Image (cartoon, helix red, strand yellow):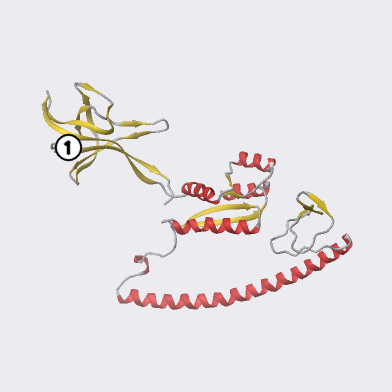
């Protein structure tokens, strides 16, 4: 390894002087001490001592964790028994059984696995906290699960882990060339990699990604509105029909279908009188302009509308043409 200042190699650096160290085999974490020694033999000896000390510390930590967990299990078991005893008394008092009481388990939890990558430990922690805060904003029971957090560009191992767990990879503030092997593997495995240098942009995109995990909800889109100007009773050979004479004052009215470039939606009608909804979810039987049957009528045009199973029209009623689409949105 060697040091650089302003991309120029140096042989020594004084106190408080920022430097870039190039050539390290592994990436140190923020806060790790870096010691300069005279030879590689001394460095290896120092490494072996540190590894032995670290292994000993891990064993002690593991032992303490096991002991703490054992104590916690005793406490939880005692609390659960007490809670169960009290619950049984309540059930007996009101003549209920356990099957009639709904469970409090979080069956509606939505788990969203993510893989996080950043340029430094501090940035990685900020990225994690920002994404975890999203679950508090949502009305749903979201559980954002960072299954892997590491520094540096996306590696093939990151992609493999994301593919196996169904996770999305979020990268923040990463510069330099990407791992071509990892990018090819991500494309073949259909793993999404979202990279940003502005946290607000990443936050907005994360909400869009997380919306795909949320249940679809009905979203209403109003295509057009019209005002009833007259009501006509038309007698034909079979039966009488009541037709509303309309003036379209906003958007368009459709006979039965709304065709977009990417989708086709069924259209329905709503009749409003003042602030009251008179009828809703109605289908159009016919839509005429002058005497011709048409598929749609634009703003500023007059038309005659006959709705199935509805004859209650009055002048001044507002007719709305709308569609309902199921969409996955972040709520």
Position of residue 135 measured from the top left corner of the image (x, y, whole percent): 48, 57
Question: Looking at the image, which residue is at 72% across and 64% down?
Answer: 32
40 to 293, vertically: above or below: below
Q: Quadrant of residue 281?
A: top left
Looking at the rendering, in which quadrant would you find the N terminus? bottom right
Give the labeled residue for mark 1: 310
261 to 179, vertically: above or below: above
Q: Is residue 318 left or right of residue 200?
A: left
Q: Quadrant of residue 45?
A: bottom right
Mark 1: few, some, or many residues within 10 Å (few <14, many ≥20)?
some
263 to 173, vertically: above or below: above
Position of residue 120 measured from the top left corner of the image (x, y, whole percent): 66, 56
Depth check, front residue: 239 or 314: 314
Question: Looking at the image, which residue is at 44% across and 57% down?
Answer: 137
Q: Is residue 20 left or right of residue 133?
A: right
Q: Is residue 310 left or right of residue 138?
A: left
Question: Looking at the image, which residue is at 63% across and 52% down?
Answer: 118
Position of residue 323 measured from the top left corner of the image (x, y, whole percent): 32, 38
Secondary element under disc 1, as helix, strand or loop, is loop
Position of residue 8 measured from the top left corner of the image (x, y, whole percent): 80, 49
Depth check, front residue: 56 or 103: 56
């Amino acid at each position: 390894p060697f040091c650089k200042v302003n991309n120029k190699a140096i042989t020594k650096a004084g106190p408080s002087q920022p430097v870039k160290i190039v050539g390290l085999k592994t990436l140190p974490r923020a806060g790790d001490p870096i010691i300069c020694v005279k030879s590689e033999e001394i460095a290896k000896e120092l490494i072996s001592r540190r590894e032995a000390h670290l292994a000993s510390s891990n064993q002690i930590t593991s032992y303490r964790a096991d002991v703490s967990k054992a104590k916690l299990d005793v406490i939880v078991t005692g609390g659960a028994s007490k809670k169960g005893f009290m619950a049984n008394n309540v059930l007996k008092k009101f003549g209920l059984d356990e099957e009639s009481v709904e469970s409090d388990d979080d069956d509606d939890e939505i788990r969203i696995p993510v893989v996080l990558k950043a340029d430094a430990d501090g940035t990685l922690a900020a990225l994690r906290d920002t994404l975890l805060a999203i679950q508090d904003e949502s009305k749903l029971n979201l559980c954002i699960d960072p299954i892997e957090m590491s520094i540096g560009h996306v590696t093939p191992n990151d992609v493999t882990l994301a593919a196996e767990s169904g996770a999305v990879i979020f990268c923040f503030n990463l510069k330099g060339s990407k791992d071509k092997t990892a990018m090819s593997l991500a494309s073949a495995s259909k793993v999404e990699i979202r990279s940003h240098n502005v946290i607000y942009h990443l936050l907005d995109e994360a909400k869009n990604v997380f919306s795909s995990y949320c249940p679809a909800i009905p979203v209403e889109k109003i295509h057009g509105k019209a005002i009833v100007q007259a009501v006509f009773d038309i007698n034909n050979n079979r039966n009488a029909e009541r037709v509303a004479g309309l003036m379209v004052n906003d958007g368009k009215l459709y006979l039965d279908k709304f065709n977009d470039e990417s989708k086709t939606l069924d259209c329905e009608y709503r009749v409003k009188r003042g602030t009251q909804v008179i009828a809703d979810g109605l289908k159009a039987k016919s839509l005429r302009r002058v005497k011709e049957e048409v598929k749609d009528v634009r703003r500023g045009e007059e038309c005659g509308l006959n709705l199935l199973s509805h004859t209650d029209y009055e002048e001044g009623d507002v007719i709305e043409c709308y569609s309902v689409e199921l969409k996955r949105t972040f709520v």
